[in-house]
Image (tube, grey):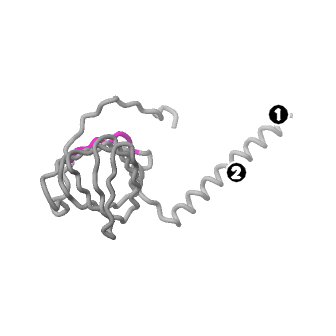
């Protein structure tokens, strides 16, 4: 970790790049989407993005967990049961990996999204085991250092 820049800073305004919605997902209109990746975790399992989109209706399939915070505008979201709900600036939505939603953007929406690749339970157990082993090793070193001090 020495020499790595562990803290990164960004600008208040970001320039977004085109991120076309898959043609087969578009149901109505000609929505134009753009995004900018703001950060990516060291292990590559998490990202933070800013995304915006013009008017249109389209499906979205989620292969990652995604938490959305709407910054500007609104969208009507329809879930797999056909239930619709309007989400506007200041509101959040959590989409679990494997879910899908129909988006109807009437004018414009801008969101910040926190994306995370779900980790399999067996992999989480391995990660937890490594963390416990590291803590125990640190504790052992501390005790050893303390015993040599006296």
Task: Please tell me which residue is depicted at 78% across the width and 43% down the height of the picture.
Answer: 143
Q: Is label 2 or label 1 in front?
A: 2
- Name, please, the residue furthest toward the bottom: 81
Magenta stretch holds residue 38: yes
Question: Image check: 132 left or right of 45?
Answer: right
Identify the mark at residue 8; answer none if there is no mark. Answer: none
**Image location (x, y in percent) of residue 3:** 48, 32
Q: Nearer the viewer, residue 40 or 13?
A: 13
Instruction: Estimate the x, y position of residue 18 in percent, counting from the top left.
Output: 19, 44
Where residue 61 appears, as percent x and y from the top left, is 29, 62
- Is 145 or 32 nearer to us in this picture? 32
Residue 127 is drawn in which quadrant? bottom right
Q: Position of residue 106 (x, y in %)?
A: 21, 50
Q: Residue drawn at (17%, 48%), measured in percent from left and top?
A: 32
What kind of secondary structure does the magenta stretch mostly adopt?
A: strand
User: What are the residue bounds of the magenta stretch?
Assistant: 33-40
Q: Describe residue 24's horizontal placement relative to residue 103 as left or right.
A: left
For the residue labelled by badge 2, is the local secondary structure a helix, a strand or a loop? helix
In which quadrant is the C terminus drawn? top right
In the picture, the disc for residue 136 is 2
| Residue 149, numbered circle | 1
Residue at horizontal 12%, vertical 52%? 30
In this rendering, the answer to whether 138 lies above or below 64 is above
Specify whether residue 48 is in view. yes
Q: Residues within 10 Å of mark 2 (few under 14, many from 20)?
A: few
Tell me if I can see residue 47 in this picture: no
Does 96 sit above or below residue 12?
below
Helix, strand or loop status at disc 1: helix
């Amino acid at each position: 970790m020495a020499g790595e820049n562990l803290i990164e800073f960004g600008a208040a305004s970001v320039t977004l790049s085109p991120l076309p919605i898959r043609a087969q997902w578009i149901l109505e209109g000609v929505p134009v989407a753009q995004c900018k990746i703001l950060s990516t975790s060291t292990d590559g399992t998490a990202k933070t993005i800013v995304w915006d989109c013009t008017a249109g209706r389209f499906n979205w399939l989620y292969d990652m967990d995604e938490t959305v915070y709407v910054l500007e505008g609104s969208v009507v979201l329809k879930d797999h049961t056909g239930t619709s709900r309007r989400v506007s600036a200041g509101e959040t939505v959590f989409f679990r990996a494997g879910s899908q939603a129909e988006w109807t953007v009437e004018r414009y929406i801008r969101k910040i999204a926190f994306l995370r690749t779900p980790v399999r339970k067996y992999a989480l157990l391995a990660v937890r085991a490594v963390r416990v082993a590291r803590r125990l090793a640190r504790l052992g070193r501390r005790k050893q250092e303390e015993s040599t001090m006296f």
